[in-house]
Amino acid sequence: MITTHHRHHLPVLRFPISTTTITTTISFTCHRPPPISASSSHHSHSQQEHEDKILRTHNAKSTSIFLQTSSTSQTPNGYEKAEILKLLDLSMARNRTPQFPGSIYVQSPADISVESSLPAIKTVFNGEIEDSDYDYEVIMRALEIRREVTLEIFKEAMRKGKFGITYSTNLASRLFPQFIDYVMIRAASMKQLPEFANHSFNFRAKTCLEDSNVVPLIRWLKHNGLSYPQIGKLICNSKGNIESIRSTAEWLKSIHVNGRYIGVALLRGGEKVLERNVEELDEILWVLEKNGVKREWMGYIVSRCPELLTFSMEEFKTYIDFYFDMGMNEKDFGTMVFDFPKVIGFYSLEEMNQKVAYLKEFGLSNEDVGRLLAFRPQLMGCSIEERWKPLVKYLYYLGISRDGMRRILTVKPMVFCFDLETNIVQKVQFFRDIGVQEKGIASMLVRFPALLTYSLHKKIRPVVIFLLTKAGVSQTNIGKVIGLGPELLGCSISKKLDLNVKYFLSLGIDLKTLGEMIADFPMLLRYNIDILRPKYRYLRRTMVRPLNDLIEFPRFFSYSLEERIIPRHKILMDNRVNFKLRYMLSSTDDEFHQRVEAAVQRRLMFESGISNNLESDSSTDESSDDGFNDMDIDVF
């Protein structure tokens, strides 16, 4: 029985292990005794001649093997290389199988050890053999056998831990040879301890596995969603210090890293995370919290970017200063790290400086870039050569200037994170297909950059089909509608567009006329019905205007009822004149008052009966091209 006190004296070995170390460790297996004397050699030769005269005839196979060992092609110690390798296999086999009677090497299940029924492996090397390929091959074969034995012991421990045969085999293949070599060398070195001197290698290997608690750890990792390749890689990364995996995992759970993210964090953090103690890990979180990252966010951040746990404190503070030097405050820094944790530990400082310098080429200042990264930190994850440069070249081809690109970047920076071929090019080609002109495409992208963030098949195309089939827009005008009102593509069909179409149809406007109104003013479908209804009610009931006035000037709904429509209507009523809606609302305040004064003068002249002067004024108006000839002035 091995006590806990004895196990504390076990030597702790770490891998990776060189071939030289392994060869040295197991060299005791192939121990060579001192050279045989000449008299001993003569005695062996005489005995061999005696055996040649008395042949065993009851077993031809055994006799054949015996004769082969006595042939002239033997090695100096009397054994062939194949025979030596066979002895190695038999002497280090875990399960000895009974042989038939008459075999040269009899193995019985009742044997206490393999040495009791086999010739001692030491007797094989009864002559001094110089270092050669022959000697190296024997030692490497012994190493392979010992590895196989250790591998089988590990599988047996897994089966006792109630793991399936397939799972145990697959996991063992991932642990071979790193962790298996660690167990093998540690078990071999334990023979030097007095308490293990008389125990077999199998017993020592089992003791090593039990002390490491690797089987319960594997079950715990499997329970948390790690696959066997991930578990195997994680155990190999620990370099034999299995306890570091458990302690680091417990620390991750304490900051609310849960489920499969524990294994992901351990794997992506690599060996450096397993080598750190809890105090060093806590210090990193303390620095983050000091600079605006909330404590309850730590689990999410570490789950998404465990690489930040691998930096030294000096490197970590350098990353933080990189963002604060761009004018970013603690609040912006904290939200940025939460939105995209990779900005703090995933990319090198050189790469980050290159991206900031490229963004400044659009005319942005250092502070502008800081605000941009705080708003959309995913930009730091985009490649300059593979993502940004092809996009800029394509936008330039469409006719968008650098100022337009700067607007796209500042208004919707996510556009610079999209793939060009699979996202932007397809949408631009779709706009061409429906009739949007090239200049219109450039202007609509600059005016409404969010257009490029919408799904072509789930958002853009369904809206276009709705306008053609349900809103009365003709095939000829659809390109004009999208070019003038790209914002329509961002509206919900069921919650916005369909409700507005039904409202206008309820006013008595037919579908074809509604399509022409939309072509004249595409934004007509974007207003809320709660805003449209009071304006229409005021137009019909207070202003006593016909529906045709609204059809001629659908932009009427774009003006404020309280600030534009009602005040100007009162001015017209007070002066007893009337204008078309276009001239009543679209002009500036100064132009409106000038037109009202001119209309009042014409009304006064009309009322005084000076018709000639009125006709003269009318001819003057027609030649002045100021729009008064089209105002449809009514006199009350």
Image (cartoon, rainbow, N blue to C red):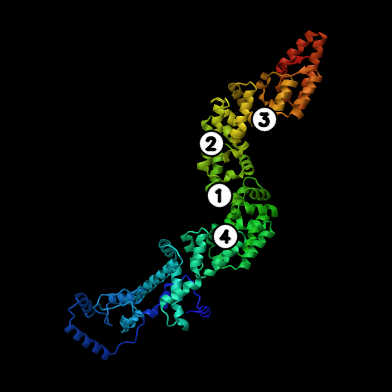
Residue 331 position, x and y percent, is: 69, 53
Is 230 or 41 nearer to us in this picture? 230
Task: Confirm or deny contact between disc 2 and disc 4 (CB under 8 A).
Answer: no
Residue ID for mark 3: 529
Q: In the displayed structure, would residue 300 be above or below residue 33?
A: above
Percent across and percent down for residue 336 are 64, 52
Q: Which image quarter: residue 610?
A: top right
Neighbor class of circle 3 (other Cα within 10 Å; few <14, some 14-19, many 20+) is: some
Give above or below for 71 relative to 527. below
> Circle 2 sits in a helix, a strand or a loop, which is it?
helix
Label 4 amino acid?
Glu
Badge 1 local density, few (<14 within 10 Å), some, or many (20+)? some
Please, which residue is most extreme toward the front here? 110
Identify the image quadrant of residue 538: top right
Check disc 1 and report the residue beneath it. 384
- Name the residue type under label 2: Val
Q: Earlier in the sequence, mark 4 or mark 1?
A: 4
What is the spatial separation of the Cα atoms under label 1 and label 2, in whole angstroms? 22 Å
Q: Which residue is mark 4?
A: 307
Looking at the picture, which amino acid does disc 1 mark? Ile
Which label lies toward us, 1 or 3? 3
Q: Are marks 4 and 1 in contact (CB under 8 Å)?
A: no
Q: Is disc 4 placed on a helix, strand or loop? A: helix
Quick one: label 2 or label 4, which is nearer the N terminus? Answer: 4
Residue 439: x and y in percent read: 58, 32
